[in-house]
Image: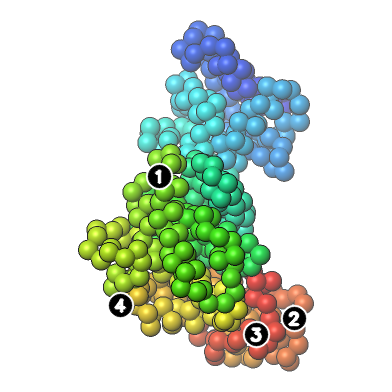
Amino acid sequence: MITAQQIKQIPASLAAILQGMRLYPGEHPQVRRQLESALDAMRPLLQQKGQLQLGFVDGILLVEDLPCLEQHPAILDLSQKIHACQLKGIRFAAGVDSSQLLELMTQLNKGNTEISDFFAILGIDHIRVIPKEETPREVYREALSVVESVYEDARLGRRPSTSMAFASVQKMVSSAISRPYALLAMTLLKDYDNYTFTHSVNVSVIALTIGRACTLPKEQLSLLGMGGMMHDLGKMTIDHAIITKPGQLSGTERRKMMEHPQHGVEIVSKMDAIPAEVIDIIHYHHLRYDRSGYPEGSRDRQISPLVDMVAIADTFDAMTTLRCYQKPFSPKRALDRLRFLSGRHLHPEYVEKFANFLGPYPVGTLVRLKDEVIALVVDQNHQGENSLKLKPIIGADGQRLLDASELNQPDSSQILAEVDPLLKGIQVEKYL
């Protein structure tokens, strides 16, 4: 029978490898001995169960279900390195060998947040790393923080960090792949006091949703998300009074505003390794599908198709945002408006795929059901294609519901019509 002490020896032996690698290269005999010692510690459990797992619950390291409460510095270091790689666990399978274990420790030491993809490329199949799952809200909030930092650096004339922005975009891409509708719902949480930052994250998220609708591969989604995040970077060089002016711009102010794409290109040209597609998005996101718009003289240029996706996202977010000259469109009405503009201002194929992806009642739409309950669409496609998750807000008796269970609907057949939240005094963002 395997004892608790034997199980607790496993993280200690793994931590010893990391300590040894601080002093010696991986091929050094001392590191090799530590690798074999760790495999010896793991072997009884692997032989009995076929696998073993390290993971975290409430920040405490567990081996299988046994908490490792020791505060030994080496074990704390192991925990911190696993966290730094954005992992919530590591699973070892019978057959793991010293070369695979060494590769794991090497990547943990590097803090490689792409360790899962790296292992897939190497074909390491006896160690499975389990990525930390962040909620769409956490991913969105982190992106807001990153955008604020990047844009502030640009405003102060400092070179913004490419790596920080790219890491945030990768998380948004993963969330857009796994929970696209929940991430899209975050774009309805408007922050009017920090509009430029919020708008930039929203455009990135909406563009990623369009990219998902168009079945772009992950690499293209990363470029699309990065371009959306950076598209308005050049506005940091424009007079703040112009940016925040509530009314119509004068001719001179408008000409100044039209310079921001070129200013954005100038900023990112000083950053590390910004791809050409991202630069295209920054430079041409105000070009329309018929290539009117600005910068002028761009009609015959070969431009990345990602530009047209960001242009749709830019328009959609503007429509669903409260302005001094317009009340916000609901997501459903905004899609109708996008369709009206497609073929001239916006790419018709991308608009149609985006609209079909969101369905007839997109997340954030307030609806009246056949039983007279008023509910909000808060997520989609969890119970099957075209299924909806609804949050009831007003009961059939017309009274506001303080606590109601979410409803899962297989389709939209129970919906009578869309409801204007302003007429009902409902702030949709409070329920997302």
- In depth, the one of 395 and 363 nearer the eye is 363
Q: What amino acid type should be assigned to the residue bearing mark 4? A: Gly
Picture quadrant where residue 272 is located? top left
Q: Are marks 1 and 4 in contact (CB under 8 Å)?
A: no
Q: Earlier in the sequence, mark 2 or mark 4?
A: 4
- In depth, the one of 249 and 93 nearer the eye is 249
Q: SS of the residue at dot 3?
A: helix
Tell me the distance, in whole angstroms, between the alpha carbons under discs 1 and 4.
Answer: 32 Å
- Please, is residue 331 above or below residue 198 in the view? below
Tell me the distance, in whole angstroms, between the alpha carbons under discs 2 and 4.
Answer: 43 Å
Q: Residue 344 at what x, y percent from top left?
A: 31, 77
Residue that extends furthest to the front in the rendered view of this protein: 252
The label number, if any, that marks residue 1 in the structure image: none
Query: Of tags 2 and 1, which is closer to the observer?
Result: 1
Q: Earlier in the sequence, mark 2 or mark 1?
A: 1
Packing grade of label 2 (10 A; few <14, some 14-19, many >=20) is some
Packing grade of label 1 (10 A; few <14, some 14-19, many >=20) is some
The label number, if any, that marks residue 269 in the structure image: 1
Tell me the distance, in whole angstroms, between the alpha carbons under discs 4 and 3.
Answer: 31 Å
| Residue pointed to by mark 2 | 401
Residue 1 visible somewhere in the drawing: no
Tell me the distance, in whole angstroms, between the alpha carbons under discs 1 and 3.
Answer: 44 Å
| Residue at the (59%, 74%) spot, across then down | 246
Q: What amino acid type should be assigned to the residue bearing mark 1? A: Ser
Q: SS of the residue at dot 2?
A: loop
| Residue pointed to by mark 4 | 343
